[in-house]
Amino acid sequence: MKRVFIALLLLAIAAVGQAQIVVDRTIVIGKIKPMNGVNNGPLSPTIEGNVQGRNNTEAYAAAKFPFVRTHDASIFYCYGGEHVADITAIFPDFSKDPKDPASYDFTITDWYLNAIRKVGGEPFFRLGQKIENHIKKYKVFPPEEFEKWAVICEHIIRHYNEGWANGYHWNIRYWEIWNEPDLDIDCWQTAPRNWGGTPKQYYELYTTTSKHLRKCFPDIKIGGPAWSGKREWGNNFLAHVAKTKSPLDFFSWHAYAAEPETITAHAEYIESMLARHGFSGVESILDEWNYIKSWSDKFDYSLQVMSKEKGAAFVAATLQACQDSPIDILMYYDASPSHEFTGIFDHPTLRPTKTYYSLYAWRRLTEYGTQVKATSSDKELYVTAARNTDGKLRVMVTRYNDDNNVVTRRVIKVATGEKFSGEVVAHITDSTRSYTEIPLVVRDGEIEVSMEPNSVVVIDFE
């Protein structure tokens, strides 16, 4: 009798631990979006053939990051430091003639952007300055002349898209005006990190620059403001853009959180905010995001989580949640292998981390291209299914929970509603494995996989 009771108890525990996912490859949802973009490029040797030059170009290329944003590149010495990407790096003396090629220093930015392009990334160019967290601020203040600053931006675009000043024809599409001008609206006079001016000054800079660039380049995408989330500021910005009829091809914004639903809630608010000001249909681009439990007492903990299995599961779950949200493009912050927010490349080895493999896994979904219906019975589980043109199915399942007290494994059942059996290949990332290949048995279109808390599995059903 005692044995029967124990057996029944074990069955009950197993039943509680199970969860059901149902996939239907016949119901198309839409396209798999480019959610695995990043900030900043690969680390490649400055001098070709330098055997001591550390690099991560092979792993970087393998992930096929679709977009690479240039913000904060100048923080990293190996990208070129103060000589790369920022407006003051490219046009170091504001008193010079902006129409004279001799006024510009493109050398290191050319090299940096070319390194991005060599690994298949599309540069997403931030026109502005890096963040300044120092006690003294140097280059985050409004330009002396907005019209001249706009002409400087024009010639930077001409260099990279039209070959001006011994330049290129790279067709860089996205041009973002500044970064987080709303971040320090309460202390912009004393401790600005990104914008040392008034909100009105930024609105005017945006209007002046965007209108000038649209007149010069009808086909590029102009936008901003890389909004940090101050709602009154954001509404006032959009009201100004609408009133002045300034171009806004995309609205870029930032979010750091410990729950994917916090980020998707921001996305819903932004969609409604854009519609309220007459900008329905404008691309919503989240071009800075990462795991942050707290900016104060839990900040060190957050930095430790970013590259571990919990950070990997958070990133995967966020990609999946955002796929089903109004967001059009994501760019993870940061791929720079020296930044404290780096979660995808280990410092100093440059080896891919567990979190890297979440972005890599998303690349494999984008290869199939078409999202099909997939549902989960449990809010702890995130599922995205993709089908290719041949009808083959690939499913990504993430188990994410920010509660460290959740420690038990769960058996996850994935059902396709189809009657086929055999063995399929899956890749799993958890506390001991990093995108490790495992076999799974399919019986009548169903498989079972045991998943730890904070783990990610990608299943190929053919």
Image: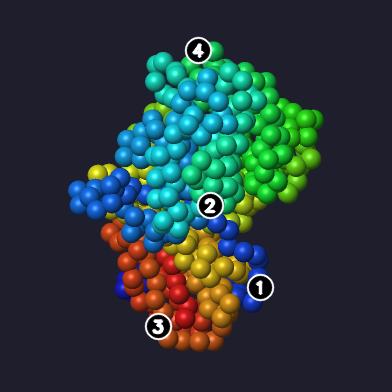
Residue 170 — which label?
A: 2
Who comes first in sequence, dot 4 or dot 2?
2
Q: Amino acid at mark 4?
A: Thr
Q: Residues within 10 Å of mark 3 (few under 14, many from 20)?
A: some
| SS assignment at label 2 | loop
Please give the count of numbered marks on the rendered protein: 4
Q: What kind of residue is marked 3?
A: Glu
Q: CA distance from mark 4 to mark 3?
A: 63 Å
For residue 135, which quarter of the picture?
Answer: top left
Q: Position of residue 102 (x, y in %)?
A: 48, 31
Q: Nearer the viewer, mark 1 or mark 2?
A: 2
Q: Which residue is mark 1?
A: 27
Q: Is residue 262 visible?
A: no
Mark 3 and mark 2: Cα distance apart in space? 45 Å
Residue 49 x/y as whole percent = 24, 53
Q: Amino acid at mark 1?
A: Ile
User: Would you name the residue on which mark 3 appears?
Assistant: 423
Secondary element at tag 1: strand
User: Is there a contact, CB below 8 Å, between mark 4 and mark 3?
Assistant: no
**Separation (CA) of disc 1 from disc 3:** 24 Å
Residue 380 pos. (x, y %): 49, 55
Residue name at image x 47 percent, y 62 percent: 363
Determine whether 157 is above or below 196 in the image.
below
Q: Is residue 39 left or right of residue 300?
A: right
Q: Which residue is mark 4?
A: 190
* Residue 52 locus on image (x, y percent): 20, 48
Question: Which of the two discs, 4 and 3, labels the residue nearer the N terminus?
Answer: 4
The kind of residue tagged 2 is: Trp
4 or 1: tag closer to the N-terminus: 1
Mark earlier in primary sequence (1, 2) = 1
| Crowd tier of the residue under label 2, counting other residues whose Cα lies within 10 Å: few below 14, some 14–19, many 20 or above | some
Residue occupying the point 37% across, 46% down: 343
